Image (cartoon, helix red, strand yellow):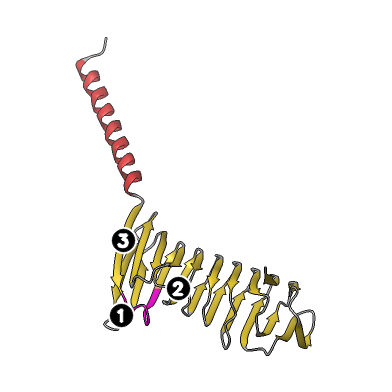
């Protein structure tokens, strides 16, 4: 038989164990937190800047030009904080401070101009007609889909860059990755001037009717049509693929 002292000790240990279990469960439940905020903007002249630390940024142009920037973020770990503000001119700036992983899903008017940055993560942009700048300083892929943007600039240190969209007349498209691949798909009737460089990788320039001004194993300078849009593709260690969209 147990003594009263022994029984009291058992009760204390059991209570302590339950308390620790409760704390563990509660911590796991609140480790992922959601953040949401909406801004009213002028669809004709609005801008969005996102500065993340670690995590993904996904920005999609809405079919209906609602004049709203809708920000949804999910904080997965750490003590990261999301701050979103709007300037008197209407530009929206979202910045993550502290350490931790935050994933963004943002809906915008299609005409919004974007400036996106994350140290580590992925960037996805779709259905936009505004200018875009996207940068990843360490590891992460950048993907563009269904774009009609006059200017696109993308830089990733060790991730792949994939672009699918139009090369608008007088547009400028600069896609660079140090160790990842660069893949571009333009419509068959595109008109552009191409500069493609891959010192350590291979280049596949698809079936475009190119007029070459310079062609080596590492560098290609050529024009398709009159060469109206400017296309600059570069990767130090990866490959370059330029394809015609069906």
According to the picture, the residue beneath numbered tag 3 turns out to be 36
Tag of residue 116: 2
Are there few (<14), some (14-19), or many (20+) residues within 10 Å of tag 2?
Answer: many
**Residue 245 drawn at (x, y percent):** 66, 70
According to the picture, the residue beneath numbered tag 1 turns out to be 90
Are there few (<14), some (14-19), or many (20+) residues within 10 Å of tag 1?
Answer: some
Please check the rendered image and state whether residue 220 is part of the magenta-colored stretch, yes or no.
no
Element assignment for label 2: strand
Element assignment for label 3: strand
Left or right of 116? Residue 12 is: left
98 lies above or below 113 = above
Disc number lying in front (1 or 2): 1
Are there few (<14), some (14-19), or many (20+) residues within 10 Å of tag 3?
Answer: some
The residue at the far top in this view is 1
- Who comes first in sequence, dot 1 or dot 3? 3
Residue plotted at (36% across, 77% down): 43
43 lies above or below 158 = below
What is the spatial separation of the Cα atoms under label 1 and label 3, in whole angstroms? 18 Å
The magenta segment is 41-49
Q: Main secondary structure of the magenta part?
A: loop
């Amino acid at each position: 038989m147990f003594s009263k002292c022994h029984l009291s000790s058992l009760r204390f240990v059991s209570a302590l164990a339950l308390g620790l279990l409760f704390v563990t469960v509660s911590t796991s439940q609140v480790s992922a937190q959601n953040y949401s905020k909406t801004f009213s903007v002028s669809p004709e002249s609005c801008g969005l800047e996102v500065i993340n630390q670690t995590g993904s940024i996904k920005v999609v142009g809405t079919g209906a030009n609602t004049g709203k920037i809708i920000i949804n973020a999910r904080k997965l770990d750490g003590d990261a904080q999301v701050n979103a503000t709007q300037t008197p001119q209407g530009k929206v700036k979202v910045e993550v401070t502290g350490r931790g992983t935050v994933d963004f899903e943002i809906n915008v008017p299609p005409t919004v101009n974007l400036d996106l940055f994350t140290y580590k993560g992925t960037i996805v942009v779709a259905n936009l007609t505004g200018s875009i700048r996207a940068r990843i300083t360490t590891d992460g892929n950048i993907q563009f889909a269904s774009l009609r943007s006059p200017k696109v600039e993308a830089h990733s240190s060790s991730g792949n860059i994939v672009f699918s969209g139009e090369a608008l007349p007088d547009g400028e498209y600069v896609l660079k990755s140090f160790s990842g691949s660069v893949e571009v798909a333009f419509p068959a009737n595109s008109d552009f001037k191409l500069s493609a460089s891959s010192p350590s990788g291979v280049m596949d320039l698809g079936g475009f009717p190119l007029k070459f001004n310079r062609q080596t194993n590492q560098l290609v300078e050529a024009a398709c049509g009159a060469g109206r849009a400017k296309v600059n593709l570069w990767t130090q260690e990866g490959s370059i693929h330029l394809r015609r969209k069906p």
